[in-house]
Image (tube, grey):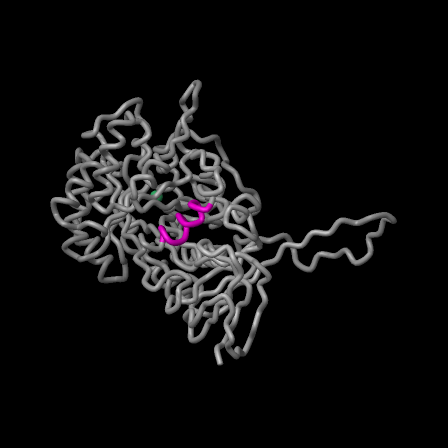
Amino acid sequence: MVELLLRNAITLDHPYHFDLAIDKGVIAARDSHLDLPAEIEIDLKGHLVIPAFVDSHVHLDIALMNDWKRPGRLKPFRSPRECNELVEQRRRSFTRQDIEQRASKALELAARHGITALRAQCHIDSEVGLSHLEALVAVRERYRHLVTVQIVAFPQQGLFGHPQGLELFRQAFRYGADVMGCASNLERGSGVDFRCHIDTALDLAMELDVDLDVHADLSIPPQVTLEDLEVVHLALRVIERGYQGRVAAGHLCALDSASPEVAAQAIALIKEAGIHAISMPDMYRLGREDPSHVRRGLTRVKELLAAGVNTAFASNNVRDAYRPLGNFNMLEEGLILAYGAHMDSIEQLETLLRMCTYNAARILNIQNYGLEVGCQARFVVLDACSPSAAIANQAEKLLVFKEGRLVARNSQTSELFPPPNSFAHLSFATPCLDHSS
Ligand SMILES: [Zn+2]
């Protein structure tokens, strides 16, 4: 007797109806027809089942810092630098309670949208110390049943110039951080160049035997050489030090500024170094000064995928000083990338679904991920009858499971009314949805 039998599912790899048996938190069996007794049996009638979404890069400690009820910027976007200064200014009023409250809401929102694992960037610097980390560690434990959280020690004020030096970062790992962060663009005024910053972060990751997660090549200069690219320096060092497969690099926007020949050489090195690539929805951030032919600021997603680089996309900023939009909804981010990266064939839309599931899970090194027998039963039943429809229709996540347990159910209803006119039975059970309180 298994706990749950799902009949007539389709998946990314299997467009024909088949059955999935779930027991003790894992996929116990799958076949075109399972003849098994089950405590509960659900006929999915051809709905798409995918492994649960993974958000591989999100700034959880600053997420949802804006007014939920009235999204949008208070002032027009000026520059990434000014947005960063705004974050620094506003975080001075953060309290541990406030960070915990926002991160809790964020994880609830993520679970509602079918995310059961995410990698959270978390400010570590001498100004905030470990206070953001303390809040995220508490929330990570409290919400373990909904979302598995990996915490990145993110050097919001660089790696140098702190009185405690790198000891602050070592402390962060003793306190519960999982992954070393790296962002050379935040080494402001210290005179440290990107090579030194990357080398130092890689050294520390290797010393602590943790993965490294790099913010790389965040700008789109008019042109770049191979040597200008941060990710090229990173790849060469990773190969030299033998740390292949342990490093992810997000943004990679400047790859798009390189000539096709230079970009191809860079991508070959990224592949050789086993670096995972993460595209962010950077279209809101870059190209704002372009008077015409406005650039999109995205990395070369299709070329990275074609070269066999494990490539995902992630939400990065959700309703914070950088991006006033976002919902922890990977189908929404996927649709943005479909437009931005010109990915519109049936196969490419399917690829987008793989990027925010299988590919992102590889970045977080999630074991037993997928829908094969023996995998952890973390999956989403979508209101879609094909993978491309999931993106195009922005399908509702009907059921969300984590370790075989139902964690969220959502529904979308729609009715059309023929005459005669009637307002009977119309009522609102709850006030307008508010995630801020
Ligand atoms: Zn980021």
How many callouts does the rendering have?
0
Question: Could you say which quadrant of the image residue 45 lies in?
Answer: bottom right
- Residue 195 visible in the current orientation: yes
Tell me the residue at 48%/37% (across/down). 344
Residue sitting farthest toward the bottom: 1
Question: Could you say which quadrant of the image residue 172 lies in?
Answer: bottom left
Residue 248: x %, y % from top left: 27, 47
Relative to 105, residue 355 above or below: above
Residue sitting farthest toward the top: 291
Relative to 28, residue 353 above or below: above
Residue 299: x %, y % from top left: 35, 35
Tell me the residue at 54%/43% (across/down). 392
Tell me the residue at 53%/77% (across/down). 38
The dominant secondary structure in magenta is helix
Give, as a single range, the part of the protein colored magenta.
Answer: 350-360
Residue sitting farthest toward the right: 420
State ligand 1's quadrant.
top left
User: Closer to the camera, 101 or 280?
Assistant: 280
User: Closer to the camera, 149 or 159?
Assistant: 149
Residue 139 is left or right of residue 247, and the answer is: right
Relative to 80, residue 372 above or below: below
Q: Does the magenta-highlighted stretch encompass residue 403?
A: no
- Residue 284 visible in the current orientation: no
Residue 327: x %, y % from top left: 50, 48
